[in-house]
Image (cartoon, rainbow, N blue to C red):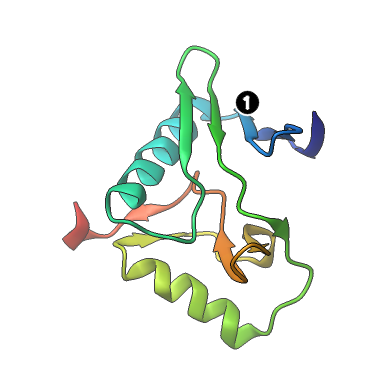
Amino acid sequence: MLKVKDTLRATVNLSFDGRVFKAYHGPDASVRFTNEVRVLRYLEERGCPFVPRLLEADETRLRIITSNCGQRVQRIDDARLKELFTELETYGVRHDDPELRNVTYRQTDGRFCLIDFEFATLLPEAK
């Protein structure tokens, strides 16, 4: 596995078969894990095509496994960045960390995708 992120809040590894393993640690790890699982399931139910698919959630290990949404984006213009996060809201979710570090590019279909939903919020009309 390739380690792609290792911070105080999470460690993210990419397996050779393309799955993403995210382990939560640090402050409020359980809360962040639970929220990301809830948001990813919600988005999948609504058919959101530009977020990872939750493949497994292990509450005892505070770890999720998701599909890969491509490579991290190094640059994107501000208008396009805002457009991506606004598009997410049409699916009933506000990301709450609308930064470039949470954008990937999926080469298979030429689509920008969003990742990292630990702090995302279900919008009131979506609950």
Q: Secondary structure at mark 1?
A: loop
Residue at image location 73% in from the left, 66% down from the top: 73
Please state which amino acid type lies under the numbered disc 1: His
Q: Residue furthest right?
A: 2
Residue at image location 59% in from the left, 67% down from the top: 109
Q: Residue furthest top?
A: 60
Residue at image location 75% in from the left, 37% down from the top: 7
Estimate the x, y position of residue 89 in percent, counting from the top left.
35, 68
Estimate the x, y position of residue 2 in percent, counting from the top left.
82, 34
Out of 27 and 113, give the one closest to the viewer.
113
Q: Residue furthest front?
A: 108
Estimate the x, y position of residue 50 in percent, counting from the top left.
49, 61
Location of the N terminus (image quadrant): top right
Quarter of the rendering containing residue 8: top right
Local crowd size for mark 1, using a 10 Å CA cut-off: few (<14), some (14–19), many (≥20): some
Residue position for label 1: 25
Q: Is residue 8 visible?
A: no
Out of 97 and 4, give the one closest to the viewer.
4
Out of 17 and 57, give the one closest to the viewer.
17
Up-down: is 22 above or below 110?
Answer: above
Residue at image location 41% in from the left, 74% down from the top: 87
Quarter of the rendering containing residue 77: bottom right
Estimate the x, y position of residue 5 in percent, counting from the top left.
76, 40
